Image: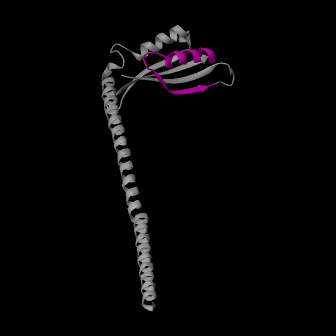
Amino acid sequence: MNALTELIQSLEAQSRRTLLFGLAGLLVLVAVLVWVVLPAYEYKSELQRRQAETRRLLGTLAELKSEYQQAKRSAQGRGTGSRQPNDFSLFSFVENQAGRDGIKEHIAYMRPSTEESPQGLVERQVQIRLEKIRLAPLIDFLKHIEYAEARIHVKRLTVRSPRNNPGELRVDLLLAAFE
């Protein structure tokens, strides 16, 4: 009987040891899974997500590049004179607009000039001095110039009011248009 109890105790000790080694193995397996396999899987998923985002951004960049090149070609075409007809004269347009707006008698002088940019664009300019003009006709004239189909813009505007007659203005304008 003594041998039988020893055998039972030894089997119980072996099963405890086996159970302990099994639990230790399971714990090691869980630790490897949590600290090695899952982070590696998450890293791979993040890399795939970044790669997909980079591909999307690259596609957008390619679209923007083609739009930019098309706009650049279009702008170069406009720079050669397609923006305005060749028979357009900024000086005569401004003079005619001043006549239509009734401010021609306020023009002290008008001086045309031309500037060429390093890119080859030609900018026509007209310098005007208006004297003894009221604010309302000046604003009407400027509106008609700014909203003209010829794409004229006011490059410089200086307004002075003389001390002896503050209601009448002296205005220096520099109008410009690209060819």
Q: Is residue 11 magenta?
A: no
Work out whether residue 139 or residue 6 is closer to the camera in this orientation and state it: 6
Quadrant occupied by the C terminus = top left
**Residue at left 43%, top 66%?**
30
Q: Is residue 166 above or below residue 58?
A: above
Rendering coords of residue 25 (x, y %) = 40, 72
Rendering coords of residue 104 (x, y %) = 53, 11
Rendering coords of residue 83 (x, y %) = 36, 20
Instruction: Tell whether 122 sits left or right of 31.
Output: left
**Residue at left 52%, top 15%?**
144
Q: Quadrant of residue 150?
A: top left
Magenta span of residues: 134-160
Work out whether residue 63 or residue 144 is closer to the camera in this orientation and state it: 63
Q: How is the image coloured?
A: one colour
**Residue at left 59%, top 22%?**
170
Rendering coords of residue 126 (x, y %) = 45, 21
- Return the residue found at the far bottom: 2
Residue 95 in view (yes/no): yes
Work out whether residue 128 or residue 4 is closer to the camera in this orientation and state it: 4
Work out whether residue 121 or residue 115 is closer to the camera in this orientation and state it: 121
Residue 134 in view (yes/no): no
Q: Quadrant of residue 123?
A: top left
Q: Is residue 25 above or below residue 111?
A: below
Q: Quadrant of residue 12?
A: bottom left
Instruction: Tell whether 142 sits left or right of 80.
Output: right
